[in-house]
Image (tube, grey):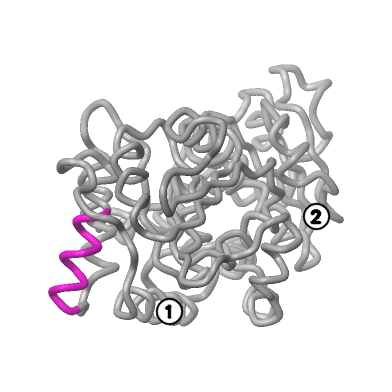
C-alpha cells in the first residue's frame, strides 16, 4: 500500500524520531511511504542513509500543485498535527477514500485503551480513526522492528565501546545520558564521584550540561564522562544495549530503552498544567505492577528525583540485580504484544 505519514516537528528528537522509525519499519515490510515533514534537518544524522521505499517530502503548502494527484491508501496524521486543507480535499475527491488515522502520543493512561480504534466522522464525509500506541493488548502496541531481538543477540557491548574509543574499567558501570535541561544532574554527578561510572552523554543538552558540570577534564573522582557525536537511530539503540543504566527522555528513546531490557530512568516532557505527572504515574503503576516493594520504591524514587517531584539525588544511583531482572521481564511482557506496524497494517486492511 501507499502510505502518507504527516509529521510536524516540535521536538526533533521525538516527533521525527517516532515517525521515521515507523516509516522505515513499514517500508521494511514492503509498504511505500511518503513522509511529509516540516523540518527534516534531524534526519541528516538520525537516518543519513534514508530507507528503501521511504520518500521524504517537505510539508506541502496549501496548494494542490505541491501535492500528489492521489493521496495514499492510508494517511497518518501523527500526534494530531492537522493535515493541510488542500490535502484533505484531495482525500474527499479520491476515487476511494483513504484510511485516515490520527496516531496519538504514547501513554499508559486508561484513556489510551478507551480511545483506541474509535472513529471520528468528519463534516466532509470522511472518517478519521484514533490509534493509540501503548503497553497493553488493548492498545496499538509499540514500534518494534522484526529483526530487533536478532540484532540484540548478535551485539557485542565491549566491541561497541572500543569502536567509540573507550573501554570499561573493572567494576565500572556504564551509563547513557539523553535528557532535556536537567536541574537534578549536578547532584547525580556529585554522587557518582564515589562510584566507578563511565557516563556516555549524547550530543545536545545532555553533553552541554555534563561539560558544564565536570569541566574540560570530563572527570571527577571515580566518575569519567565521554561526549558522543550525533548518533543514528541504530547507533543510539546500540548505546542503550551497551549501557547498564539508561537515562532517556520524551517518547522515542523511552520506548527504545524498554526494548533494551536494561534499567532506565525516564525524563518525561514537562507540561505547564502538570498533566505530565499523571502520565508518569500511570506508566510507573503499570511498569511496577507486581514488583517487590523495595524495587518499586527504588525505581519510583529515581524517577521522582529525575523529574523534579522530590529533592535531587542524595546517594549514587547504581541499579541492582532486581532492577536488571525486572527490565528483562518487562521487555518479555511487551514482546507478547503485537507491534504497532503489524497492527496498523491489519487495521488498514480491515478498514480500507
For residue 209, the mark is none
Q: Which of labels 1 and 2 is toward the front?
A: 1
Q: Which residue is mark 1?
A: 328
Q: Classify 10 as above or below 310.
A: above
Seen in the image, is 42 located left or right of residue 344? right
In this view, 21 is above or below 274: below
| Residue 84: image location, x then y, percent | 63, 25
The quadrant the C terminus occupies is: bottom right
Chief secondary structure of the magenta portion: helix
Task: Indicate the position of residue 302 as horizontal and vertical percent values.
Answer: 25, 55
Q: Nearer the viewer, residue 121 or 260?
A: 260
Per the rendering, the mark at residue 32 is 2
**Which of 89/48 is in front?**
48
Give me the C-alpha separation between circle 1 and circle 2. Answer: 34 Å
- Inspect this view and state whether residue 134 appears: yes
Q: Residues within 10 Å of mark 1 (few under 14, many from 20)?
A: some
Amino acid at each position: 500500500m501507499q502510505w502518507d505519514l504527516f509529521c510536524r516537528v516540535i521536538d526533533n528528537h521525538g516527533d521525527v524520531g517516532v515517525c521515521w522509525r515507523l516509516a522505515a519499519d513499514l517500508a521494511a515490510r514492503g509498504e511505500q511511504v511518503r513522509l511529509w515533514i516540516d523540518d527534516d534537518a534531524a534526519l541528516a544524522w538520525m537516518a543519513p542513509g534514508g530507507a528503501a521505499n521511504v520518500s521524504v517530502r517537505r510539508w506541502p503548502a496549501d496548494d494542490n500543485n505541491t501535492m500528489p494527484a492521489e493521496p495514499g491508501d492510508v494517511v497518518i496524521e501523527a500526534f494530531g498535527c492537522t493535515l493541510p486543507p488542500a490535502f484533505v480535499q484531495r482525500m474527499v475527491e479520491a476515487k476511494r477514500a483513504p484510511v485516515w488515522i490520527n496516531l496519538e502520543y504514547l501513554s499508559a493512561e486508561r484513556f489510551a485503551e478507551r480511545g483506541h480504534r474509535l472513529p471520528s466522522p468528519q463534516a466532509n464525509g470522511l472518517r478519521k480513526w484514533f490509534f493509540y500506541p501503548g503497553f497493553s493488548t488493548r492498545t496499538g502496541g509499540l514500534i518494534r522492528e522484526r529483526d530487533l531481538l536478532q540484532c540484540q543477540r548478535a551485539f557485542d557491548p565491549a566491541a561497541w565501546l572500543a569502536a567509540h574509543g573507550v573501554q570499561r574499567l573493572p567494576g565500572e558501570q556504564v551509563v547513557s545520558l539523553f535528557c532535556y535541561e536537567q536541574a537534578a544532574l549536578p547532584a547525580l554527578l556529585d554522587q557518582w564521584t564515589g562510584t566507578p561510572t563511565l557516563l556516555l552523554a549524547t550530543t545536545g543538552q545532555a553533553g552541554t550540561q555534563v561539560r558544564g558540570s565536570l569541566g574540560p577534564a570530563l572527570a571527577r573522582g571515580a566518575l569519567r564522562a565521554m561526549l558522543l557525536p550525533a548518533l543514528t537511530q541504530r547507533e543510539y539503540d546500540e548505546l542503550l544495549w551497551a549501557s547498564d543504566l539508561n537515562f532517556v527522555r520524551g517518547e522515542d528513546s523511552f520506548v527504545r530503552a524498554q526494548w533494551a531490557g536494561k534499567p532506565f530512568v525516564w525524563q518525561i516532557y514537562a507540561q505547564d498544567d502538570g498533566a505530565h505527572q499523571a502520565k508518569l504515574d500511570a506508566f510507573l503503576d503499570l511498569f511496577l505492577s507486581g514488583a517487590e516493594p523495595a524495587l518499586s520504591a527504588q525505581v519510583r524514587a529515581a524517577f521522582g528525583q529525575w523529574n523534579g517531584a522530590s529533592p535531587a539525588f542524595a546517594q549514587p544511583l547504581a541499579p541492582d540485580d532486581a532492577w536488571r531482572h525486572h527490565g528483562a521481564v518487562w521487555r518479555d511482557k511487551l514482546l507478547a504484544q503485537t507491534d504497532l506496524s503489524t497492527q496498523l497494517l491489519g487495521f488498514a486492511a480491515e478498514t480500507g
